[in-house]
Amino acid sequence: MIKSIILLSGGLDSLVSLGLKKEELNIDLALTFDYGQISAQKEIEASEKICKYYNIKHQIIKLDFLGEITQSSLVNEQISMPDTNSEQNAKSLWVPNRNGLFLNIAASYADSYRYDYIIIGANKQEAKFFPDNSAEFIDAINKEFEYSTMNKTKAVAPLLNYDKNDIVMLALKNNLPLELTMSCYQGKNKNCGMCTSCKNLKNALLANNDSKYIKILFD
């Protein structure tokens, strides 16, 4: 029987990836990373709720060194948090080798405990500005895993061909628990509605004519 790990941030993309692939790929372990990001505690809390909902194991991994070497508004509150998508703003949000590091750590778990797949919420919209969300990146890391894992673990990104509007549509269509998510970079009690991540989510909800989750998720 196959079994899988998911990289779970507690946000939209990882929740939808989990909800869509939980049964098919037998996801029974979620890894959440704390690298000193401003939103770490809220991401952990959301991930814990999601894991409880889906009855899967949850492991929190601290990567203090990554926060120490990162010059990003996700970590440093003195750096202005961007509110729109652009190449320049992507640089402000960049965390060095984040998805590469996360996937390789997950691959170590997979190789030790014989997991077949690692699920990641990479998607088409974020791939425009973050190359570690692209299909080319997923293909490249799977080539690496052929050499670096004994059991030939594979990364799977079920949302690669979807933008945020599509991802919200999938969540609503499949009755996934969006109320459990936290997508905000600011680490507030509710999504701030102002940072790039919040605006992407809110615009996607509006595009899907949703008002229910806008009321639940945003201030």
Image (spheres, rainbow, N blue to C red):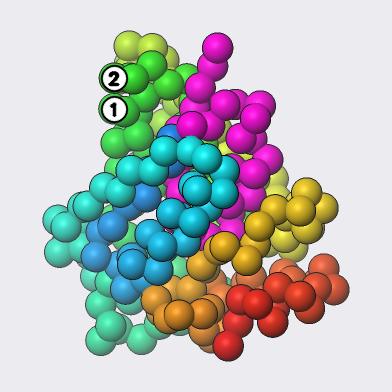
> Residue 86 in the image: x percent, y percent?
53, 73
**Which quadrant of the view contains residue 144?**
top left
Which residue was labeled with disc 1? 108
Nearer to us in this view, 149 or 135: 149
Compared across the picture, whether 77 is left or right of 163 comes to left
Q: Nearer the viewer, mark 1 or mark 2?
A: 2
Which residue is drawn at the image coordinates 20% and 56% (left, top)? 66
Are the two marked residues, 1 and 2, in contact with CB atoms closer than 8 angstroms?
Answer: yes
Q: Residues within 10 Å of mark 1 (few under 14, many from 20)?
A: some
Extent of the magenta region: 1-28
Q: Position of residue 30 (x, y in %)?
A: 43, 41
* Figure quadrant of residue 127: bottom right
| Between 52 and 189, the one nearer to me in the picture | 52
Question: Does residue 121 lie above or below 150 as drawn?
Answer: below
Question: Foreground residue, 86 or 28?
Answer: 28
Q: Residue furthest right?
A: 209
Residue beneath disc 2: 112
Residue at image location 47% in from the left, 61% down from the top: 46
The three-letter code of the residue at mark 1 reads Ser
Residue at 33% from the left image edge and 65% from the top image edge = 40
| Location of residue 94 in the rendering, given as x and y in whole percent from the top left corner | 36, 64
Could you tell whether 166 is left or right of 8 in the image? Answer: right
Please identify the quadrant where the N terminus is shown: top right
